[in-house]
Amino acid sequence: MTDTLTGWAATTKDAPLVQMQLPLPQWNEHSVDMDISHCGMCGSDIHTLDEDWGPTAFPCVVGHEIVGIVTRVGDKVANIKVGDRGGVGPLAYSCQECDTCLEGHQNCCERVFVGTYNGNYPNGDKSFGGYADKWRGDGRWVFKVPDNMSSADASSFFCAGVTSYAPLKKFNVNEKSVVGVLGLGKLLFACHRGLGHFGVLFAKAMGATVIGLSHNDNKKETAKELGCDDYINTHNEFDLARYRKKFTHILCTGTGSDFQWSTYYNLLHINGHFMNVAAPEWKFPEIIPIQFITQQISISGSAAGSPATMQEMINFAAEKEIKPWITTYKMSDVNTAISDLRAGKPRFRFVLEN
Amino acid sequence: MTDTLTGWAATTKDAPLVQMQLPLPQWNEHSVDMDISHCGMCGSDIHTLDEDWGPTAFPCVVGHEIVGIVTRVGDKVANIKVGDRGGVGPLAYSCQECDTCLEGHQNCCERVFVGTYNGNYPNGDKSFGGYADKWRGDGRWVFKVPDNMSSADASSFFCAGVTSYAPLKKFNVNEKSVVGVLGLGKLLFACHRGLGHFGVLFAKAMGATVIGLSHNDNKKETAKELGCDDYINTHNEFDLARYRKKFTHILCTGTGSDFQWSTYYNLLHINGHFMNVAAPEWKFPEIIPIQFITQQISISGSAAGSPATMQEMINFAAEKEIKPWITTYKMSDVNTAISDLRAGKPRFRFVLEN
């Protein structure tokens, strides 16, 4: 047993990642150790390295779409065992005591937010992510990867996948649903790149009719390749007319600052759901109350997923044999992969492989 | 049988109502005739008389919280029979053929909107409301008043009542819910006066903990009298702190233009619902996407109720023995009642009685 990891760490902003030995968090009865085999790359990794979301505590090892082999578990770990393949997403710990945690919404814990990297556990230990050889964290945030799914495929489900899955599930997408997915391509905000592709894959697997949405025709072919049943250019009046009031759900994984509610009000069916998982810096525009009322539309947001949702999501993906579109890089080529990620090259997710 | 009604009609904007004989709509196999015993007064009546919402087709008889004795039914009327007490709300007809109607959301019909007054049926006949002696309309929009409820009490449920009931029901308010109700008093927009009081009564009857919300302390006593479990002045930091993230639902039946999302984000629990039924002329402010996401809040609107919801609502009100706060006026005193309504006197609804 060792209490160190060897990770690809950023030592300052703008520096290339370098290999470095760093301490694993202190072991406790809830701990799980994993030998990392794969780690998906998320736009959040770049935002953290660039300090877009506030100061980063360097040295920092990013990566929160981790899959590995479990090598050791604490006495109180019941959901995963040595030899299993475990998966970890963006959250590594919650208080487990507040109302929100007790209700099973630990992803929205009222008291503690420990990200899988650049976070601090209650004892002060730093959290380190998956661009590394080893990971240690709380077993309540480790999920079992189903046998029929490769580790490379599994990894990116644990952040991008669940973020798109959770609202589709919450608002009961099924065979009768007509789901529009916004954000299929090279988005302005890298961290949401790939969410749209998972949105399409999950909504299709749930049996829905799925329509790609974008503000031009550029993603039409992509939408088709992904399995969309149709495509709408939201600036094309004929397209809009064809789907007037037809959508039961719109999943917004990204959109430009030219966003207008009226476009989506007109597309949404009565009691339709506009579900947003994109976090751009601009705001959604003002809302005319009567538009809500006459169409009984709801607008909502969703944050990754609770532990129960995470496990359910990966099980569902395996059962439906959902195949994400990924490109793998060797972990040692991480700096090249980052450069390609910054250039918007993923179609739709990158995965690092040890 | 007569094909005329005697109603209290407005002949022009700003004129007092005068008694006038007017034609009932043409009889058909779906028709129901009622002798009106009571009609609740809704702010919409005033807005229509004042042409606030567009031109009014004078002469106009308003009133869409109608209760009466059924005197005749068409061959295809199955839900109500001669001698029953029938109730009618703000909608009098829908196409019954579009997807929305077929799904049971006839209140949001995509093709036809025939208001109970100031509307036109597909054959061109005008619709006249309940400030009258007789009403004729489509039986699919007539609901049976339960035996244990007085006609005076029943009337105002058919617009104000259902408008508050429908979103509480849709978003599953129950014994575990903590429901905030905005708009308990003399509101800027008369048409919503009384919705808040129904919101409190229904949410209590559903078993919820109910908190009155207002931007000052003026409605504290009223909230208590209505049965609220507590009261929050939204400009009082201590009040806000007590209920931080505690509300599962907020029903907005009215609010000022100083409305800020942050107040309600901070009060709403994870996965909380902000349900709006108020239609002021101002807009809800811009929304910061991340605030939706981290709290997984939904914002929605609701429009009166479908026929099924109408009947369910009045049955539930009767079962729970909900007693609305009403003041009755003789139908012949309608002009005094309108003057009092304009002055904001109702606590909380006025009912005209033949």
Image (cartoon, coloured by chain):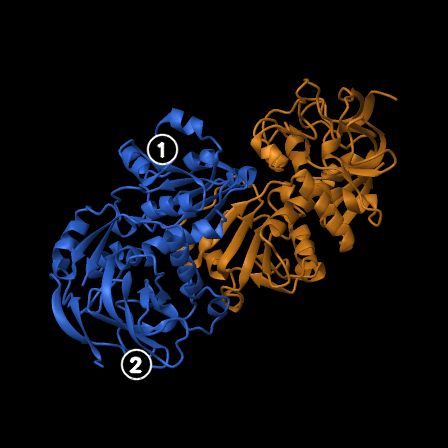
Chain colours: A orange, B blue
Residue placed under numbered mark 2 in the picture: B27
Please give the chain letter of the residue carrying mark 2: B
Residue B62 in the image: state x and y as whole percent.
Answer: 22, 64
Q: Pointer 1 indicates a residue of which chain?
A: B
What is the secondary structure assignment of the residue under circle 2?
loop
Where's residue B90, x and y in %? 32, 62
Q: From the viewer's perspective, is A264 left or right of A30? A: left
Using a 10 Å C-alpha cutoff, classify the residue at mark 1 as few (fewer than 14 neighbours), some (14 to 19) or many (20 or more): many
Label 2 environment density (alpha carbons within 10 Å; few <14, some 14–19, many ≥20): some
Residue B166 placement, left or right of A86: left
Q: Which element carries disc 1, helix, strand or loop?
A: strand
Taking the image as drawn, is residue A313 in sight? yes
A300 sits to left or right of B285: right
Q: Residue furthest front?
A: B148
Q: Nearer the viewer, residue B29 or A205?
A: B29
Which quadrant is the N terminus of chain B positioned in? bottom left
Q: Classify residue B234 by image quadrant.
A: top left
Residue B231: x %, y % from top left: 36, 33
Instruction: Please state which of residues A15 and A91 is positioned toward the viewer in this rendering.
Output: A91
Question: In this image, B346 relative to A172: left or right?
Answer: left
Q: Amino acid at mark 1?
A: Tyr
Q: Amino acid at mark 2?
A: Trp
Q: Is residue B303 visible?
A: no
Residue A234 to residue A51: above or below: below
Q: Residue at x 36, y 50 (%)?
A: B321
Vertical placement of residue B87 versus A318, above or below: below
- Report the residue marked by disc 1: B231
Residue A263, image x, y percentages = 48, 57
How many numbered discs? 2
In the rendered image, the quadrant that contains the C terminus of chain B is bottom left
Residue depicted at 63% across the width and 51% down the height: A169
Q: Is residue B130 above or below residue A298?
A: below
